Amino acid sequence: MSFLVTSCNSFFEKLDGLSYNISRDRLIQNIEKPFNGIVVDTFSYRKNLRATDIVLNSGDTIFPTNDQVMKVIQIGDSIYKKESDNYIYISSRKNDEIKKLWYLKIPQEYRDDERFPKGWKTNWMESTVDH
């Protein structure tokens, strides 16, 4: 019986580690990837919930984890993100105002991870969840 419990615990630890690695790597890839376009739609994959995703005329769909982005963004606005940056810039279609907002939450455990890019360790601190 204890072998089974130990085996199950080991399996779930490996599964947690794999999930952590995939999430960290996906976050890094999303920060590295630039985008630029005009907002043509917003939506949520969950029925009857506020919009969580943005569709650009370039065909990209983006999912910012900063709630402020979804409160500010409107169809017709221009939005861009530079390569390897965690800020997005929203240019309102109604006026010349450009808003700069952080894009993705960065858990402190990712910042502390040796595999997280060293040059980013102290960047975008306002987007870190556990500080």
Image: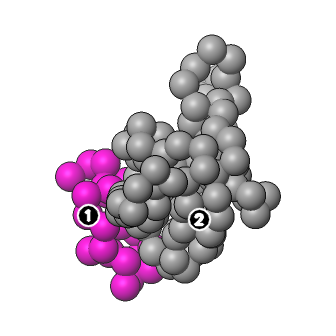
Does 41 sit left or right of 124 as displayed? right
| On-image quarter of the N terminus | top right
Q: Is residue 49 visible?
A: yes
Of the residues shown, which amino acid type is indicated by label 1?
Answer: Met
Q: Residue furthest top?
A: 48
Q: Residue furthest bottom?
A: 119
Residue 29 is inside the magenta segment: no
99 versus 6 height, above or below: below
CA distance separating discs 1 and 2: 17 Å
Of the residues shown, which amino acid type is indicated by label 2?
Answer: Asn
- The residue drawn where x is 63% and y is 14% is 48
Using the image as rendered, state which of residue 95 and residue 25 is in the foreground. 95
65 versus 97 height, above or below: above
- The residue drawn where x is 66% and y is 33% is 43
Q: Earlier in the sequence, mark 1 or mark 2?
A: 2
Q: In the rendered image, which residue does mark 1 sit on?
A: 125
Q: Position of residue 85 (x, y in %)?
A: 45, 74
Magenta stretch, residue numbers: 107-131
Does 19 sit left or right of 64 as displayed? right
Count of marks, rendered view: 2
Q: In the rendered image, which residue does mark 2 sit on?
A: 30
Q: Quadrant of residue 67?
A: top left
